[in-house]
Amino acid sequence: MRKYSYMRCRLLACFLAVCCLAMGQNNRMSVEKLISFVQSSQKIITEEKTMTDKQLAEFLSKVKLTEKLEPRVIEDLQALGIGPLTLRALEKLRLDSQTLTPSTVKQVLPDEPIPPPTAQEQGAILDDVRNYVMNYDKNLPDFLCTEVEHRLMAPRPGGRYGGRAGSEPSYQEQDTITSRLSYFNQKEEKKPILINSRPVTTSYENLGGSTSTGDFGTMLRSLFERHTEARFEWARWATLRGRRTMVFSFRVAQANSNYSIGVKDLKLEIVAGYSGEVFVDTETHQVTRLLTVAEDIPLDFPVRHAQTRLDYDYADIGGRQFLLPYRGEVRMEGGEVFSKNLLDFLHYKKYSADSEITYDIPKDIGAIPDSKLQETPAGKPGMDCKDPKNRDAAECKTGPGKN
């Protein structure tokens, strides 16, 4: 065993040494060479197990690009299954390369293009989604779950304490709110139980700092109500949590919006217009992700930017599978401070009057694997779970049709 470990480390060292020689002493690399390097490294990580996500990320932290790294290149590399540390390193390279000359790389993964649905088909799909959303609350059972909300803050990059402009915000966790979330008779109630490890008696609305409400269905239902007059457009195909997904962009005018942003300390509140994307499962026409970004915020309002993301996945309640929120993210930017709230929805169980629920706080904010949050490009058609030969595939173990 010792001999094998020694050989494995020596082979890895040789691989990295060859890469260093290929780049030169200044660690300079073109985008094309970066792609090739990440592809080769990820193959070693997944197939030979002689390299780790951490080691690849550490190596990338020493790279200096000679060209601008575009977001689409990173999205394509995500389809290879790169780890969260590698993804973070690539995002830093992207930010550091913004002033460089654009690269000529067109596409990383040579997948066959998939034609989008016709305009008529898109209309029918959105009608199905609207019907699903309008009946979402009615089809849910009474349940309980634990919501763990990590609240983080960072000084604005380029500000007095935030480092150089254009750099990543340096978020520091401020506290963790653990709440009992109940859904009974189609009514949601959030009751905070702990802040860090201290018991809480006040209501969630009266807590200080950045908070969020309406996590289950309020924003989604409002988006698809007829009077909102949301404008939907086809965006792209994608793969989310192993399933073929349709992505539609949308925009809601301020006059038809109920997207409210408040600053409690100053007793200020506005209603903003918003845009974003809705992710729709191709097979079931159910919503699996909702992204929203506030628009038309007044210039003199303390909050300059606000966006939310809510991911849905299947959870077992009473022996049946239901599509429910499992990870949320709320980001806001003020004049000198950024805030980020990460919400994990855990321990779903059937509601009863004497139900007990434990309040286990994850040790880190990565309680839910980041890999389940990564969108990847859609190339070849997804797994056909109706085909008997695919019944044992991982993609067909959970999801639609399992309730």
Image (cartoon, grey):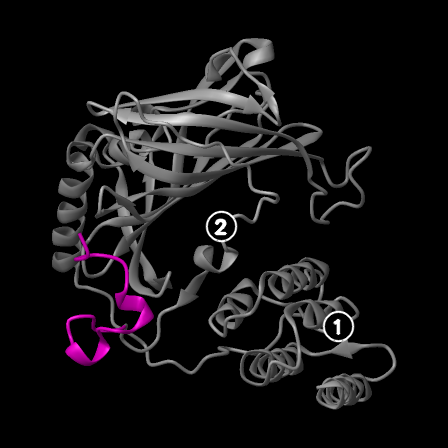
Is 124 positioned to the left or the right of 176 in the image? left
Along the polypeptide, which appears first: circle 2 or circle 1?
Answer: 1
Q: Nearer the viewer, residue 96 or 286?
A: 286
Q: Position of residue 76 (x, y in %)?
A: 49, 71
Q: For the residue marked with disc 1, what is the amino acid?
A: Phe
Q: Quote the CA–CA distance across marks 2 and 1.
A: 26 Å
Task: Name the residue beneath numbered marker 1.
Answer: 59
Answer above or below: position of 159 versus 319.
above
Answer above or below: position of 297 versus 317.
above
Q: Position of residue 325 (x, y in %)?
A: 36, 41
Q: Position of residue 197 (x, y in %)?
A: 62, 26
Q: For the residue marked with disc 2, what is the amino acid?
A: Ile
Residue at horizontal 80 percent and vertical 43 percent from the top = 163
Q: Secondary structure at mark 1?
A: helix
Is 309 positioned to the left or the right of 194 in the image? left
Q: Nearer the viewer, residue 362 or 383?
A: 362
Task: Name the residue beneath numbered marker 2.
Answer: 368
Residue 380 falls in which quadrant of the image? bottom left
What type of secondary structure mainly makes up the magenta span? loop
**In the rendering, which numbered label is found on residue 355?**
none
Is 195 positioned to the left or the right of 204 in the image? right
Residue at horizontal 23 percent and vertical 30 percent from the top = 142
For the record, the magenta segment spans: 383-403
